[in-house]
Amino acid sequence: MAKPAKFLRNVPRWSTLFPVVLYVLFILCILVLAFSSRSQSDAKLRKAEHGAINGVSNNGPNVPAVPSLVYRKLEEGVVNELSVAFAKADTNGDKHLTVQELAKFINFKIREHIDEAIRTNPIMFVEIDHKPRDGLVSWDEYQSYWLHEKGIQGDSHMKKAMFDKLDRKIKESIARDKAHWMEAARTDPLSLTLDEFLSFRHPESSTVNLLNLVDDILRQFDVDGDDLLTVEEFSDVQTTDLGEGKKFILSQNVRERKEEFAKVIDKNRDGKADRGELLSYVDPRHPRYAIQEASTLFSLADTNNDKKLVMHEVLASSAIFISSKMIHTAESFHDEF
C-alpha cells in the first residue's frame, strides 16, 4: 500500500491541471480563428483581383473596377473620388471615357460650381454683415468670420504676439485673402458690396470680373479702338503680351486662334466680335473650357493613345485628375483666377 499512496501523492491535482488545460484550449481556438479569417481574406482578395483583371467591380454595377496593385498605392479616399467621378462621366456605361464624355462631365461640374457660388453668395454675405448690418462686408467682419470658421479665437485686430503663433499656412492664407480683397474692392478698400464679395470669393462666377476680362481683351487686341475685334486683330497678338493670369484666355498659336474666332467667338458670322460675343467667350461655362481641359487630361493620361481612358489610366495619373475641374472644380478655378 505504501507505493500506490506515494504515486498518488506525486500526481498533480485537478485544481492545478484545469487552468493549464483551459489555457491550451484557448490558444488552440485563437489559432483556428486566425487561420480561418486569413483564408477568407485571401479568398476575397483573389476574387477582387480576378474581378479587377476582368473589368468587374465589387462596389456596384456602375463603378469601374480598380486593379488591386494600384489601389494599394493610393489613398482609399482618392480612389473613391476618382471611381465615382469616372462612373458619372461614363454615360454609356462601357467602362471607357471618350474626350467628349469627359468634356461634358467637366462642363457639368463647372456649371454646378458657378450656380452654387451665385446661389450661396447672398446667404454668406448676410451672415457676415452684422457689425453693423449696413449692406457692406468689411475686412474686419470677414476676417473675424473666417477665423471663427477655422476655430481660431481672434479678429483682424489680433495682437502681433497671437498672430505670430498662428500656423504658417494660416498666415499665408490671410495674406492671400487680403490681396484678393484689394483687387475686388473697387469702391472702398475697407468694404465690399454684394457683387464685389462674389468677385472676391469666386472671381470665375462674377459677371463684373468677366466684363473686366473683356476689357482686357479689347485693350490688348483692338488696334483701331472701335470696340470690335476682327479675326486679324485677335490672332496676331502674342500671348507673351498678356499677364500671367490672362494667358488662359487664348489658344497658343495663330492658326488655332483664327479657327477659334470663326467657330467659337463670331457667332453671327459678320467677321467681327462685339462685347456680347466676347463675354460669352470668356465665360467659364462656355464648352470650350471643358473641351480644352479634357483634351489636356487625355494627352497626359491616355498612355496607349487609343482615344479612350480606362480606370487604371486615370488612377495612374491620379494627381492631375484630383487637381482638375473633374474632381476639385473650385480649387482648380481659384488657382487660375
Image (cartoon, rainbow, N blue to C red):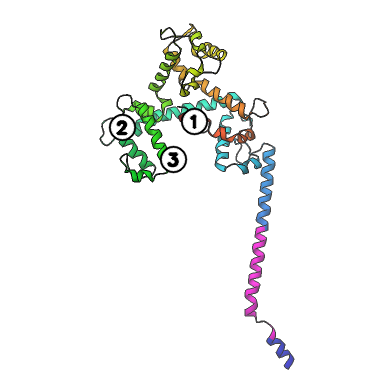
**Amino acid residing under circle 3:** Lys
Most foreground residue, 44 or 277 = 277
Left or right: residue 239 versus residue 37 is left
Residue at 65%, 25% in the rendered image? 307
Image quadrant where one finds the N terminus: bottom right
Query: In front of the other: label 1 or label 3?
Result: 3
First of labels 1, 2 by sequence position: 2
**Residue neighbourhood size for the residue with mark 2, other residues' Cα within 10 Å, grouped as few (<14), some (14–19), many (≥20):** many
Q: Position of residue 147 (x, y in %)?
A: 36, 41
| Residue bearing mark 1 | 332
User: SS for tag 1?
Assistant: helix
Q: Position of residue 61 (x, y in %)?
A: 61, 37
Q: Are marks 1 and 3 in contact (CB under 8 Å)?
A: no
Residue at 45%, 17% in the rendered image? 280
Disc sitting over residue 137 in the figure: 2
Q: Is residue 284 visible?
A: no
Based on the picture, tell me whether residue 24 belongs to the magenta stretch.
yes
Q: Position of residue 294 (x, y in %)?
A: 57, 25
The CA span between labels 2 and 3 is: 24 Å
Q: Within the image, what quadrant is residue 277 found in?
A: top left
Disc sitting over residue 169 in the figure: 3
**Amino acid residing under circle 2:** Val
In magenta, the rendered stretch is 10-34
Query: In front of the other: label 2 or label 3?
Result: 3
